Amino acid sequence: MAATSWGVLLAILLQQLAEVHTLTGPHVCTQQQSRSVTVYQQTSRQQYQRYTTSCGLFGWSRCTRYRPITAYYSRPVYQTQYYQTQVCCSGWKQTGTTCNTPICSRGCVQGSCTAPNVCTCTSGYSGARCDTDINECTGSHGCQHNCVNTAGSYRCTCRTGYVLYGTKNCTDINECTAGTHRCDHTCHNSIGSYYCTCRDGYRLQGSHSCLDIDECTSNNGGCSQICSNIPGSYRCSCNVGYALQADSHSCRDIDECSTGNGGCAHNCTNTVGSFFCTCRTGFVLDGNGLTCSDHDECSTSHHGCEQKCNNLHGSYYCSCNIGYILAADKKLCNDVDECSNGTHACDHNCHNTRGSYTCSCRNGYELAPDGRGCIDINECDRGTDGCGHICKNTQGSFYCTCQSGWHLGTDNKTCLGNPCVAIDTPNNGARACSGFVTNETCTFYL
């Protein structure tokens, strides 16, 4: 029992000794420590064990019996043990088998822990925990223009119109050659900036824009008549009928009539700044004001003409209708007697009328459709002849003839039978005759 407890304690002691000798190097301290150790002690006690055995007649039964036995068991015993061990001294922590890593209990924000609760800060930071940024711009930063503090450092910038050269110096920007200016017209570089100017005829608005100057708003630009503003300048011009002089400002009257008669067809009259056209007698001015058209005098009056007024180019004359002749006054009209002067066209008879004439025909003729010629009337065809037998037409008349055995009567139209040969009465018999001329009959009988 006692030997077993001491063996356990020996094993624990050897383990502690091994732990004491594991750390090497500086910052290693020895420390007494205690811990609760559980030791198991062996003990015994008397107790009864239940068992069965044969019993009764011939041992045929089973009986329960109890017998005393000694029972051994272990019980835990709790003891406090004290021992020496190696630990890292305060402010250091173990790394492997050494204690070379310092401990900064609050931590180092921008740096590293180099000794217990001692922080070594990276450049640009300060403070016990290296959590305070150093504003280098408050000291000797070396920037030529502007210093801008940053977290743990700083940077240099330049004023407008400059660019950083290297890391601290600034050099002028030529905005005019770099194309970064905003001038409408001309850019002029200056140290750190630039300025704009405008071409002639423009004025600067603000610092960059160029606006056209309207020269015509001041004294009409010096133009005597019309001033027209154009981008960056102006020009003078003249009203219709005037020409611009060599000074490009004054205007003089143009004598339009001196060139091509001003375009007038007849007469051109110059006026100040213009001209007008007129026409000769018998003509009127056209709507274009240049050309002349004949004036039709007859359209408004006959001008004393008895019958016809005839327009001429620039004049007029009187004339008469057919059948009339103009009188000596060149206005009245006298009748022409076509029948007496032989100008008629009648075949037979001419009858004068005022302004004309009529025709008629002799007996046996009738007037042709043209009212002038005469056409023979065929009395035989029309049945107006009155002939007893045969009608023969002639120019302007007709005549009658008779068939054989007949002769014409005194009226020259009726046909009379010719006398027959004498017919004697037969010796035997009798006769009966209707007459003894042509077409009469005789009958003989017994």
Image (cartoon, rainbow, N blue to C red):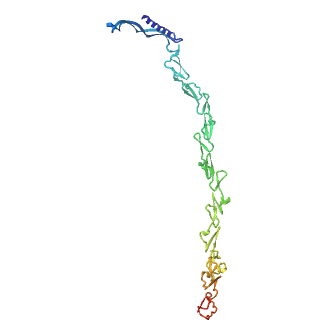
Q: Is residue 224 left or right of residue 66?
A: right
Percent position (x, y) of residue 23?
52, 11
Residue 77 lies in quadrant: top left
227 shown above or below 134: below
Q: Outermost residue, top direction?
A: 2
Q: Nearer the viewer, residue 280 or 205?
A: 280
368 shown above or below 32: below
Q: Quadrant of the N terminus?
A: top left
Percent position (x, y) of residue 115?
52, 16
Q: Nearer the viewer, residue 133 or 259?
A: 133
Q: Is residue 99 visible?
A: no
Looking at the rendered structure, the number of numbered marks drawn on it comes to 0
69 shown above or below 175: above
Q: Is residue 160 left or right of residue 59?
A: right
Residue 139 lies in quadrant: top right
Q: Outermost residue, right direction?
A: 259
Name which residue lies at 44% across and 8% down. 81
Q: Is residue 229 visible?
A: yes
Q: Is residue 76 left or right of residue 377?
A: left
223 shown above or below 129: below
Q: Quadrant of the C terminus?
A: bottom right
Percent position (x, y) of residue 103?
50, 17
Q: Outermost residue, left direction?
A: 57
Q: Nearer the viewer, residue 12 or 48?
A: 48
